[in-house]
Amino acid sequence: MQTQHTKRIECGTDEAGRGCLAGPVTAAAVILPPSYSHTLLNDSKKLTAKQRNQLREEIVCDASAFAIAHVFPERIDEINILNASIEAMHLAIEQLTIKPEYILVDGNRFHSFQNIPHTCMIKGDGRFLNIAAASVLAKTERDRFMKQLHEEFPEYGWDTNKGYPTKKHRIGIHKIGPSKWHRKSFTLLSTQTEIDF
């Protein structure tokens, strides 16, 4: 895997939680040293929770700069999940202590940020270490957030499903209704009879 796409000061950015029914969409932006390498670092979805948490600590120590940002359900409902994902990336990039000269984005959609050139990379989190690092930070930060919310809302099983549309999560919505953390613009309960209550 390459460290980055260009020889400029480049940040990788990625988001987590786009397909969830509840909680924020979370993005991270990471600038790595140009010579950075890591044998384990990969797309966060291909790592175990233990590996992600180990990598999080290393990335925080090793990165030249990093930042993480949340966009919450009310805003997601207002501007839609795609725009909210991009907004979270913008917020993370804006917080970097080093201004990037280039932005490498996981996925295929992005809005220009402060006229800094960017490239979208499909499956970029499996191709570039700076995006993979952003992927790990976004995922671990969002997982921590959802585990905290679980303490207040245990009925939805957010400690294990993190807000994704699992059977347990949907049973919780069916029994007690949506919480203030649910995305009201999403289909919270399937119209199909896939859940046997």
Image: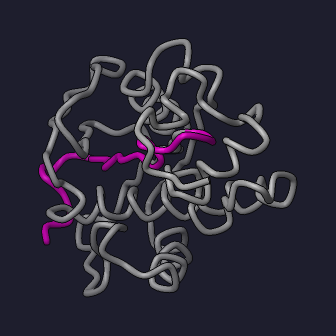
**In this rendering, would 6 be left or right of 160?**
left
Specify whether 180 is left or right of 129.
Answer: right
Q: Quadrant of residue 39?
A: bottom left
Q: Which residue shows up at 47% across the image and 76% down it?
A: 52
Question: x%, y% of residue 129?
Answer: 25, 65
Query: Residue 114's x, y, as percent?
Result: 36, 18
Q: Is residue 56 left or right of residue 83?
A: right
Residue at the image position 59 percent from the left and 20 percent from the top: 75
Query: In this view, which residue lies farthest toward the top?
Result: 78
In percent of the image, x 50 and y 39: which residue is there? 92
Residue 170 within the segment the image draws in magenta: no
Q: Which coloring applies here?
A: one colour
Q: Nearer the viewer, residue 44 or 181?
A: 181
Please tell me whether the stretch drawn in magenta is mainly helix, strand or loop: loop
Question: Which portion, as a residue range, is magenta?
Answer: 1-24
Count of numbered circles on the image: 0
Q: Position of residue 104 (x, y in %)?
A: 23, 43
In percent of the image, x 20 and y 46: which residue is there? 8
Q: Is residue 10 magenta?
A: yes
- Give the x, y percent position of residue 189: 53, 36
Relative depth, front residue between 56 and 168: 168
- Residue 115, quarter of picture: top left
